[in-house]
Amino acid sequence: MEIVVVGHLSRDLIITPETRQEMLGGGTAYAMLAPAIGAFGTGIISKVGLDFDEFYKISLMASGLNLIGLHYEGDHTTRFVNEYDADGERTQRVEALAPQILASDFTKEHSRASIIHFSPLSCNEIDKECFDVAREEGALISLDVQGYLRAITNDCKVTSQIWPESDEILRLVDVVKLHDAELKTINADESELSAVSHILDIGPRIVMVTRDRRGSTIYTRNTQVDIPLVLSNAQVDSTGCGDTYAIGFLLEYMRSANVTRAGLFAATCSSFNVETMGPYDMPDRVMIETRMRPYLQA
């Protein structure tokens, strides 16, 4: 496999003043981007419950994902409820969490992937030993930190938290993806550059910082590359933009070894993501290259 994405799939319930809709969520769902853009084999490692809709499994399989790492365990799939008020403010709570992903859930085929991307939705979702297994065969190890910065209160609401084991996990990965708000949660008293420098000193060699509609910046130990916002044709749903950004970057970086090109490719993947609801209708490489071309020439 070229890439494996590790983390819980989720039955996300979206509630707005006008609608109530369930959809498939989690970074592993947005791994459906990878086969669409030509990855040489894409797998996921995830756990779901008996309540996982067969339609979701069919959609994952039809996209080209390898599902040998999809494990059914227990009654409940992870379920997030995202409720938006009339002003667009979100309240998030958790109705269920699937069992923890363990090192034993990896097969040899998974551990031999070129890229292993961890995308947890909650802080205890992935056992630390999974990172050790991922490193055994020399894969490029990537992490979206989002889940580690989430705490779940006694009344099941999702709040932000400090990540006490950050250094322990970060030293095991090569690439880190954060939203700028998440970076401030980790290092509230430091500038972005200082906070990123601290992460790079721990061990990662690439840090991606995304900023909603304000573009992104990719840092290495020697360079800082600002990536502009790539414009979309519509604004429907921003869920999964960070996931498509990370997956797009990783695959293109492995092909080109060019941070700027990979960053623009990632931003273009995200621009298509906001045009639809859920992890469906993924763009192919021709669509991405066509939309990206003017930004490469700028």
Image (spheres, helix red, strand yellow):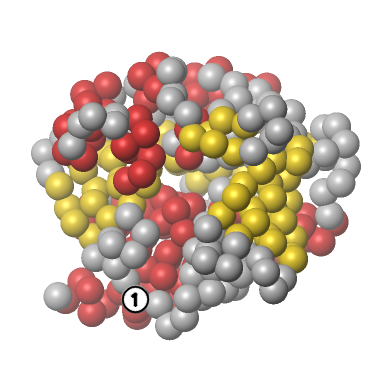
- Relative side of 58 to 292, left or right: right
Q: In this view of the protein, which residue sits in the foreground, 195 or 185?
A: 185
- Relative side of 28 to 189, left or right: right
In the displayed structure, 44 sits above or below 20; it is above
Q: For numbered disc 1, what is the local secondary structure?
A: loop
Outermost front residue: 86
Residue 153: quadrant of the picture:
top right
Q: For mark 1, does the 10 Å Cα neighbourhood hold few (<14), some (14 to 19), or many (20 or more) residues?
A: some
Where residue 123 appears, as percent x and y from the top left, is 56, 28
Q: Residue at x 68, y 47 (%)?
A: 80
Q: Residue at x 69, y 27 (%)?
A: 154
Q: Which residue is mark 1?
A: 231
Question: Which image quadrant: the C terminus?
Answer: bottom left
Where residue 25 appears, as percent x and y from the top left, is 64, 53
Residue type, numbered disc 1: Leu
In the displayed structure, 180 sits above or below 128; it is below
- Relative side of 130 to 149, left or right: right
Q: Residue at x 59, y 21 (%)?
A: 127
Q: Is residue 199 visible?
A: yes
